[in-house]
Image (cartoon, grey):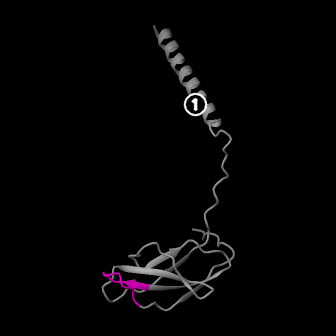
Amino acid sequence: MRRPLLSRALRVIGFISFVLAFFLAGCENSHNGNIQAPAQPPNPHSVTISWTASKSPVVGYNVYRILQSGGTVKVTSGIVSSTKYTDRTVEAGRTYAYFVTAVDAKGIESKPSEKITVNVPTAVAPPANP
């Protein structure tokens, strides 16, 4: 009696292998010629700025970048509730300047903070050895 049970088990395994092989073969051809290029590697550079919390009641902060033309652009998509922000859109070898404003419950912004200037290195520093 063990023989039929083993035979049935092998048939089930064989069927599962066939289905799996058929499925995988279908996946290989499922792109229909629409091959996509690999995704760009993440930007290895970033700038993190931090500041002292406002002594007045605020709901958060806006972070701005000062452009080379002298204009400004808000780099935060919304109000930042912490006193730290990381800009992941910076490029190697460039210099960036930032300032922060505090925002109260009515949405009114404070005067800009002092500007901070940051130089982004051209090379990525290797990770520290533990």
Residue 111, how many percent across, how many down? 42, 91
Identified at 69% across, 74% down, the residue is: 123
Residue found at the very far top of the displayed protein:
1
The magenta segment? 101-110
In the image, residue 34 sits, relative to residue 44, either above or below, namely: above
Residue 68 in picture, x, y percent from top left? 63, 85
The image quadrant where one finds the C terminus is bottom right
Residue at position x 60%, y 75% from top? 90
Q: Main secondary structure of the magenta part?
A: loop
Tally of marks:
1
Decide if residue 65 is on the left or right side of residue 121.
Answer: left
Q: Of residues 75 and 19, which is closer to you in this image?
A: 75
10 inside magenta stretch: no
Q: Which structural element holds mark 1? A: helix
- Residue hosting label 1: 23
The structure residue drawn at horizontal position 46% and vertical position 85%, both measured from the top left corner, is 100
